Amino acid sequence: KQALTITKMKKMKQLGEAISMLTAYDYPSAKLAEEAGIDIILVGDSLGNVVLGYDTTIPVTLDDMVYHTRATVRGAANTFVVADLSFMTYRLSVETTLRNAARLMQEGRAHAVKMEGGADIADEVAALVRAGIPVMGHIGLTPQSVHQLGGYKVQGKLPKEAQQLIDDAKALEAAGAFAIVLELVTEPLAAAITQELSIPTIGIGAGRGCDGQVLVYHDLLKYASPYREKKFVKTYADIGTTIREAISSYITEVKSRAFPAEQHAFGVQEQSEIANLY
Ligand code: KIV
Ligand code: NA
């Protein structure tokens, strides 16, 4: 299987073929997503919440993103991987943005970067694209601005806000972005933006009218404790419960000495080399 290209993504939009995107943050999550056949892997700065245990994405550093992107790409060498530029690794100057995005591609080995913002970052997006760095935009609820936005709420409900989001989407397209994430916007607005653009929109909490969908790995798998239910998420498994129950069984069997059993132990006469531990 060959990794998707930004040209093919645009073609998929034209053909009405939905684009599937999922976050992954390390080797095993990326490997499983690739084996399942995901179109795009996003190394989201949501790793701050779901992997590093912060309560927002704001503490996530560029070093964190590079480290996790590297591990993710090792697990999914044949999948298009997008890495988030984390809080304040852009917007300082075009030069800083270029330097930081280059690290995600050279050290992290991502195919593209994603950044939150619209018309306000169009000059930076254009500079990245000129340098050969594909950019995915991200508008609507932009978690790096949670304190400015006053919480995680649906965006673009007022006509003036909706118009701003349409303008932002068009500015990103004009700057050369290859796709745009629409996060937590109303279904009619997301559908309208999708129709206005020739580049694909990838929705999360943005309804049925987008060209593709993205979910956070830990949401799809219910891989958290406690798991916070969210209206826009569908959980396809309950890995959190599965893992907790498995660990609990292990503890019980260690305590009762049911594990290890005879079949797990080595006798003196046995072949003593194990082919590969992992
Ligand atoms: O960080 C992330 O996971 C994201 C997606 C929710 C789009 O930006
Ligand atoms: Na993100």
Image (cartoon, rainbow, N blue to C red):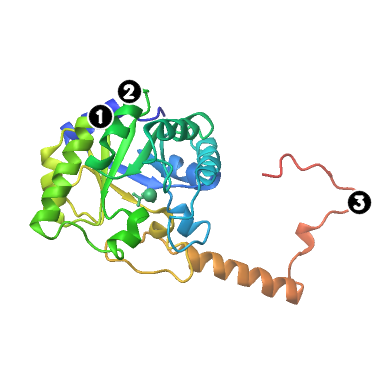
Q: Is residue 100 above or below residue 223?
A: above
Return the disc, 3 or 1, that comes first in the chain's sequence: 1
Where does the image place residue 113, in percent across and percent down from the top left? 39, 36
The secondary structure type at the circle numbered 1 is loop
Q: Which mark is residue 130?
A: 2
Return the disc, 1 or 2, that comes first in the chain's sequence: 2
Q: Residue 268 carries which label?
A: 3
Classify residue 169 as left or right of residue 39.
Answer: left
The secondary structure type at the circle numbered 2 is helix
- Going by the numbered disc 2, the residue's amino acid type is Arg
Disc 1 marks which residue? 176
Classify residue 90 as left or right of residue 273.
Answer: left
Alpha carbons under labels 3 and 1: distance apart: 66 Å
Which residue is depicted at the point 50% across and 36% down? 73
Return the disc, 3 or 2, that comes first in the chain's sequence: 2
Q: How crowded is the residue under tag 3: few (<14 C-alpha within 10 Å), some, or many (20+)? A: few
Query: In this orientation, which residue lies closer to the viewer: 224 or 128?
Result: 128
Residue 111 shows up from this direction: no
Q: Are marks 1 and 2 in contact (CB under 8 Å)?
A: yes
Which residue is depicted at the point 71% across and 40% down? 276
Q: How crowded is the residue under tag 1: few (<14 C-alpha within 10 Å), some, or many (20+)? A: many
Which residue is farthest left? 159
Ligand 1 neighbours mark 1 (CB distance < 8 Å): no
Where does the image place residue 94, in percent across and percent down from the top left? 37, 32
- Going by the numbered disc 3, the residue's amino acid type is Val
